[in-house]
Image: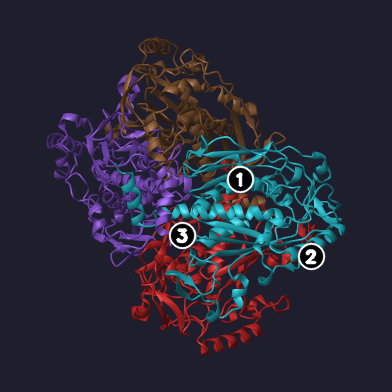
Chain colours: A brown, B purple, C cyan, D red
Amino acid sequence: MAGSNFGKNFRVTTWGESHGKGIGVVVDGCPSNLPLSEKDIQEYLDRRKPGQSQYTTKRNEDDQVEILSGVFEGKTTGTPISLLIRNKDQHSRDYGNIKDAFRPGHADYTFDSKYGIRDYRGGGRSSGRETIGRVAAGAIASKILKGLGITLITYTKAIGPHVIDDKDYNLNEIFCNPLYMPSKNIAAKAGLYLENSIKEKDSVGGIIEGQVLGLPPGIGEPVFDKLDACLSKALMSIGGVKGIEIGSGFEAAKMPGSLHNDSFQIKDNKVDKATNHAGGILGGISDGSPLTYRLAVKPTPSIAQMQRTINQDHTEINLEITGRHDPIIVPRAVVVAEAMTAITVLDLLMENTHAKMEYLEIIYKQTFV
Amino acid sequence: MAGSNFGKNFRVTTWGESHGKGIGVVVDGCPSNLPLSEKDIQEYLDRRKPGQSQYTTKRNEDDQVEILSGVFEGKTTGTPISLLIRNKDQHSRDYGNIKDAFRPGHADYTFDSKYGIRDYRGGGRSSGRETIGRVAAGAIASKILKGLGITLITYTKAIGPHVIDDKDYNLNEIFCNPLYMPSKNIAAKAGLYLENSIKEKDSVGGIIEGQVLGLPPGIGEPVFDKLDACLSKALMSIGGVKGIEIGSGFEAAKMPGSLHNDSFQIKDNKVDKATNHAGGILGGISDGSPLTYRLAVKPTPSIAQMQRTINQDHTEINLEITGRHDPIIVPRAVVVAEAMTAITVLDLLMENTHAKMEYLEIIYKQTFV
Amino acid sequence: MAGSNFGKNFRVTTWGESHGKGIGVVVDGCPSNLPLSEKDIQEYLDRRKPGQSQYTTKRNEDDQVEILSGVFEGKTTGTPISLLIRNKDQHSRDYGNIKDAFRPGHADYTFDSKYGIRDYRGGGRSSGRETIGRVAAGAIASKILKGLGITLITYTKAIGPHVIDDKDYNLNEIFCNPLYMPSKNIAAKAGLYLENSIKEKDSVGGIIEGQVLGLPPGIGEPVFDKLDACLSKALMSIGGVKGIEIGSGFEAAKMPGSLHNDSFQIKDNKVDKATNHAGGILGGISDGSPLTYRLAVKPTPSIAQMQRTINQDHTEINLEITGRHDPIIVPRAVVVAEAMTAITVLDLLMENTHAKMEYLEIIYKQTFV
Amino acid sequence: MAGSNFGKNFRVTTWGESHGKGIGVVVDGCPSNLPLSEKDIQEYLDRRKPGQSQYTTKRNEDDQVEILSGVFEGKTTGTPISLLIRNKDQHSRDYGNIKDAFRPGHADYTFDSKYGIRDYRGGGRSSGRETIGRVAAGAIASKILKGLGITLITYTKAIGPHVIDDKDYNLNEIFCNPLYMPSKNIAAKAGLYLENSIKEKDSVGGIIEGQVLGLPPGIGEPVFDKLDACLSKALMSIGGVKGIEIGSGFEAAKMPGSLHNDSFQIKDNKVDKATNHAGGILGGISDGSPLTYRLAVKPTPSIAQMQRTINQDHTEINLEITGRHDPIIVPRAVVVAEAMTAITVLDLLMENTHAKMEYLEIIYKQTFV
């Protein structure tokens, strides 16, 4: 039941429901002496909050983060960092008619089965707003990674049938359209597709793709805390994600070994690979190549169309969901995926600092008077 | 670095390398009073060991399990259960020429980067034999689940381009062919495909599909230890797995919400769903429907064809891998997937026993004198 | 570095420094459906806050707790409970002259060694105010235990040389004097002793004793998570505690086995013990008798007397600590000890709900439709 | 229920019962490239095994350790190290008459309450033989610490009323008498005391004292994984230990602050303390001074004298324990205490390698190509 903490070294504990007093996170284990301010974190939160696209709901929230502990004179102290984001705009009246209904595709029924009680307002803890804490923590992790030369790029690869192919990619486009798609062209088509979906009172799914660049080889802990295994847990825990693949992913299942294997070579005096079907991970450990993954995101469950379902009394009913709902969550989930990736990668980087006797000797020669 | 243990309540610690003295596992946290014998475990190990199919290698191992602790007069005591499987047939000479090479698709390079040392014989800890410990532990977990009315069915859904479609399914066929495919027809075609692959000194990938039936609703711990998140970690940690999807998986990314949503209904006085695109999980918690997942397995990296690669001195070389190697690992990985699924589901079932005040009251009314 | 979380099932993550914006805790894993309000928690916090005794400092804090999440319509939802206590009265100027000094008996030097940075104001994270989060979480744990018939009694057993002997005990006196001593007589003597200490600009230590009544047998997880081992970790983590003993404790080292062994007997048809030198724990598991422990608390390090020490430049200096400091911390630590005991006992009670197959069967017969 | 694993980075999982097939341990997370052989481990086990003193029982065991994994060409690979010690001499007939009795001072009753089943032979998992796995793991940890300049000294400080005072100490005497007492004189007196105890069919307790020298400052993780808290859990988990104190321990409760505080000073250009009442730990973090602790060990519960007790049917009975039993366990527990100390200190040393940004930068500048 203590399912709200993640990580072993860079430990993240999130809390908060959609209509509670606030949402937050405690980051325990952040190394000391990292310059950190609200601005560093707000930048990431702003990539998540609603209202910045014609396709996301107009729930008017400031979502301003406040650092309550763990930072002194602008630097982390190594003690727990508590971040708080107050909930402001909570339109309780939007949810009245679904108080007792088990909405299809939502966690109402399963939360009710598990806990025997649930905060029905806005989905409570199962609401997408729960990811605010994750993104805040991910901002801190990203800053540390950046300082070590590791960068993350995350974007929408597909919306419905509109997929970005290898030839379409232009990473500079990511922040130039509200769908975070690295292609002006496909973003436009996807936009029209979404408008049509809204008219039909329906919703749409998509695919998120992420890359991690500059990750040194050696990161990941066989056999159970492998880099791909930990990433999968982190990313599949995001609401709405129904699948993950690394490198060639499901395509690899159809390839022969002679094609899928990435040959090693030496380039500029460094170890390099001729191809990267492995997606940067071999045997669960990073190999120095770009780490690539893809997530399948299901269509938003809250649609305005009439749906058959049941309520808490187990009576079959017709349900019409009113109120504010995104026809698509993929663009908003992009920064959540990036945050979870940053957290996972950092956690394993920190784990690796005691992998060899050599590392212990380096650190303790330094410290010993 | 302590990456060889899995689970919070039903805690599994595996150990052992391909060419070490043995392989084993310690299961800590198994409830007491479960009847358990070597036979219960051997049955699962036998589904894994080589030599039972014309398509798997002829490495002659008994892989007989020995229970060293945790069982008394035929029942578990609640104390740790240590299982040992001695390695017998270890053909060291098969690996001589690759002692210094970084084989493409294998973990040689990454283990070397991480640890600065590796047991190069047979892949050491990165060898598929590492899964023996997992399967042994999974046998125990499966027995407990079975007693609670929960059953697992796992099989090969695809080999290369040969995929089993909805209309082909015949679950009775699973144990009737060495590929564990639930279709006599497709199994035959896949067989020919494999024979051809062997001739071409190449290898092949595939897809494993698994189902969990009879799982009660309420299992899974939001937000990070969700059932799908934990399963993903467990299954993606299996060597060779490059992707996982739950329910509709990557198909969901292309579906509209009106189609993907599963309507609730009442059937035989119980909560039921009209469809199951969710794959049995909503909001990270089981919903009472069959849990379904699919894994993408890459083609076996060890192929007899010549490959370009480098060695430890960073010299580019041509590599020819001799010795015994499976052209496909999918059929042998089926029981590994089933084992990891059983372990994960049981761990979360055990976690759920203190989810509500009601459960604590039930248990402690019982115990209180 | 992630040392601020405690517990496996009832997981407590505290945060906050003496002079930061606030102090708090996130409780993850609290069972659902427990009635809970701020009042339940404030009652415990009030036993901790300064100003309620002539012997504790006059730092004027409200220390009012706010529940930010995890409670809905007066009951816990099973989701994380975030509690916040804002810091108000922070007299920064009290600490100016010790900014660079390593105060004897304090953690200044060790925090500086570890993190290379520290919030010097009021001890930062090493301040006694850090325990506010623990006490808040302990209030919730205590409420759950109480509902299961388990009660905790904690008090000051000794201050300096003034010790409460078996013949002096009157538990009704605990809340009738500001020292929380179960003896009017000894409390008066201790009071005079303290006044004298203040005059001499010195400080005083003492002993806390605690009991847990009504704990059923079977609680504790051999061999490393034994009840006494877990309690020891919990209680020794309280600042200022330098020793712990269970039952006869250090006296047992001098007793013969014929005397120390507690004979079993049947009383009122129940298993009972003739004596309780074991302190309620055998083999690390509760035996149904009262659990008793004792803590040694060192004298408060901040004294007004001049002390020799060094500063950050490694220059030897004379240090005079000004400002507000308790001559004794024991009475305020009593509720902290009680809180940590409640948290530990509850965590292990929750762990025990899946100890036997019988428990799994009971729970899952209930849940299965 | 998964109580048999200890540690976060240097993770130790022990298994095995007194009369099962064997006893063992899996060490997961040992850094790679440490030279390691059976000899390194056997040396520590030999300090534990029975038969080497006229005061310990003559149970004839070889207790020879076998390394089953994790070591290649004489060095650790970073993969799990599995150690096995077969049980040989198991005199089942010694235990027949106590099959159903709940022996006073033993864990029979509590194991029975918890699990509903127990291996009654020799105490099963609650037997002192369980510590073999701990000692084996501690041998590895000690070797690593030694290489980093950290040494452990552990010995018997008292047996019954015979206590070694400051003036008596001669550390060279520790291995010169079977009681591991650092005083020839007191060891002789204690010896006579023990002989008398055997004649009276009784048993005796004592005190173990341990020191850790050369530990750098900065080790320990506030607020819950403090060095003293973690040590307390580790040491109190040893069977028979009823109390622990650090530095002045219970004496501190009676000292004024002006005396207990250790002044800092500079000596040989290094930070030093004039006294060490703190026992080497401040705020839960090592301060560079010798770490000192003391354990209270209860008298062995198995005595030959007649005792009143009950059996499983809850009938009151007279019990006479026959067979082989130590009149004192303290000397054999000395190496167990040393092992647990080594494991705990190493675990926290490894945790500290990512405490500051500076450490991450050092490691990753090294690794980055």
Tell me where residue B251 sits by quadrant: top left
Residue B45 in the image: x percent, y percent?
A: 25, 53
Identify the residue position indicated by label 3 in the image: C221
Q: Secondary structure at mark 1?
A: helix
Q: Residue at x 28, y 56 (%)?
A: B91
Whether residue B316 is visible, yes or no, is: no
Q: Is residue A341 left or right of residue A205?
A: right
Identify the residue position indicated by label 1 in the image: C136
Q: Is residue C61 left or right of residue D232?
A: right
Label 1, label 2: how far apart the Cα atoms are: 32 Å
Amino acid under label 3?
Glu
Q: Residue at x 40, y 19 (%)?
A: A321
Identify the residue position indicated by label 2 in the image: C189
- Dot 1 falls on which chain? C
Residue D49 in the image: x percent, y percent?
A: 47, 75
Label 3, label 2: how far apart the Cα atoms are: 42 Å
Q: Secondary structure at mark 3?
A: loop
Amino acid under label 2?
Lys
Label 3, label 1: how far apart the Cα atoms are: 26 Å
Whether residue D176 is visible, yes or no, is: yes
